[in-house]
Amino acid sequence: MSKTNQPAWLDNAVFYEIYPQSFCDSNGDGIGDFNGIIGKLDYIKELGCNAIWMNPCFESPFGDAGYDVSDYYQAAPRYGTNEDLKRLFREVHKRGMHILLDLVPGHTSVEHKWFRESMKAEKNEFTDRYVWTDSIWESPEGMGCIRGISDRDGSCAVNFFSHQPALNYGFYKPDPDKKWQQPMDSDGAQATLGELKNIMRFWLGMGCDGFRVDMAGSLVKHDEDGKGTIKLWQNVREFLDNEFPEAAMVSEWGEPDKSLLGGFHMDFLLHFGPSHYNDLFRCDEPFFSKRGNGDVSEFVKKYIENYEKSDKKGLICIPSGNHDMDRLARGCYENDLKTAFAFLLSMPGAPFIYYGDEIGMRYVENLASVEGGYGRTGSRSPMQWDNSTNAGFSSAPSDKLYIKQDDRPDRPTVKSQSSDENSLYSEIKRLIAVRQSHPALQSRGEIKFLYAEKNTYPLAYLRSAENERILVIINPSDRATSFDCEYSLKEKIYSVGSGLSVDNGKITVPPCFAGYFEV
Ligand code: NOJ
């Protein structure tokens, strides 16, 4: 534990997100599995990542890629057994790395036995496990619902897709006229919370290092300011502090002032909500584009707001992408990607690299939806390892792959990129190594933005920790640009591109450049 009550390993963690379906298939059935992942751990370590977030791997009908759990205590057979998963944990630890599982606390699959019991008209142990109204004719306000599929006279709130019924953690301020809105301390809500702790206890006991928590801010209903949900997570925090003080918790919440208060160690910056994250890489004119028509200022404004609100803890994780967004390489190309990673790998919080982004894997266009992916399916195609069959992902016949691969002849692979010093992969590997050897660039180093003007380049910020101060200057555009800087540059620590010049406090930044300088 560091002095800040957070597991020390998070301070210099660089995460790699594994989407287990698509990473590596060891048994030739066309879909990835735990043993496939184990076989690739050395690859992840070699890249420099020291932590893994693995998407849900529990029993599920996979109507939402496993975010529709039907048994929280069982690994999905298509990935392997609980024993295989335990071995994965051990193999990760053997390499000095850590692994977070994906915890889906807000909803289950309609196939979960709790829901099957809960649907029954007769009262039973699971009657209050989900959020039900007490008449089929009444919908839970502000939420979608499932109704008319069993004899139970009620409508059940859903959290995401209509096959994902919402678990009952209670209402922050239940409406006294609606008896079905149970308070947070009701028996039903408390039983759900107790079960959530059991699930966490089970997997932490098996050896995982913590959780990325799905839709963490959504648990308590009618809770606009998140006060109830914060309270709930504080309760979980207490349980963890007592039983698993080393467990790491990262939230999919997008409001660090709330999630950190709830006891999470880190929160994600997300592609939805007011974050302006999309201004960076995923809009018509992203900032990270050599066209140079982007605007980073709104993103920075929002980032600073969150940074201040979270007490300058800065534990906001900025992912390169994830299984819900377009591939980074859909809107950014070649040098854009290099400068993008120079940014991602020099920001506070832990960076998250979505599998394949390190080789610039592309979004596969025009795919039919798989496992509830819809437009997300193109970002979930199987990993491209080498030039063997199915790019080394699987020995199954190509038409048996559960998602079609990028079949363009120039598709990037790990093999081609790792043998090329100028590739994106090699650049990222160097950038991670630089981050790992400079505390100022790591999770807890402070950040001060020096230049982030509207519709203008470059972006410049100062990172600092103890005696180290590093100035980061990034100009993704294909035009040279300059800014006035009060700091004098000492040594160059690293750069993508070259040719920066300083004259009398004015720094001129060459096109497509990113550099880290000691000041
Ligand atoms: C967020 C997950 O990242 C996404 O993939 C999933 O569909 C929803 N939550 C629902 O669990």
Image (tube, grey):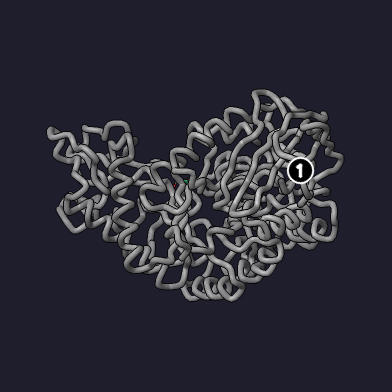
Residue in view at x 68 percent, y 39 percent: 365
* Residue 403 visible at all: no
Q: Position of residue 341 (x, y in %)?
A: 70, 46
What amino acid does circle 1 point to?
Answer: Leu
> Height in image: 176 above or below 350?
above
Residue in view at x 85 percent, y 56 percent: 421
Q: Position of residue 515 (x, y in %)?
A: 76, 44
Left/right of residue 101 with respect to residue 135 in the rendered view:
right
Q: How many marks?
A: 1
> Height in image: 74 above or below 489?
below
State the residue in front, 231 or 463: 463
> Height in image: 11 above or below 289?
below
Left/right of residue 99 with respect to residue 309 in the rendered view:
right
Residue 4 falls in which quadrant of the image?
A: bottom left
Q: Position of residue 371 (x, y in %)?
A: 52, 49
Q: Position of residue 427 (x, y in %)?
A: 77, 52
Left/right of residue 254 with respect to residue 225 in the rendered view:
right
Badge 1 residue CB within 8 Å of ligand 1? no
State the residue in front, 265 or 142: 265
Residue in view at x 19 percent, y 44 percent: 183
Q: Which residue is mark 1?
A: 489
SS for callout 1: loop
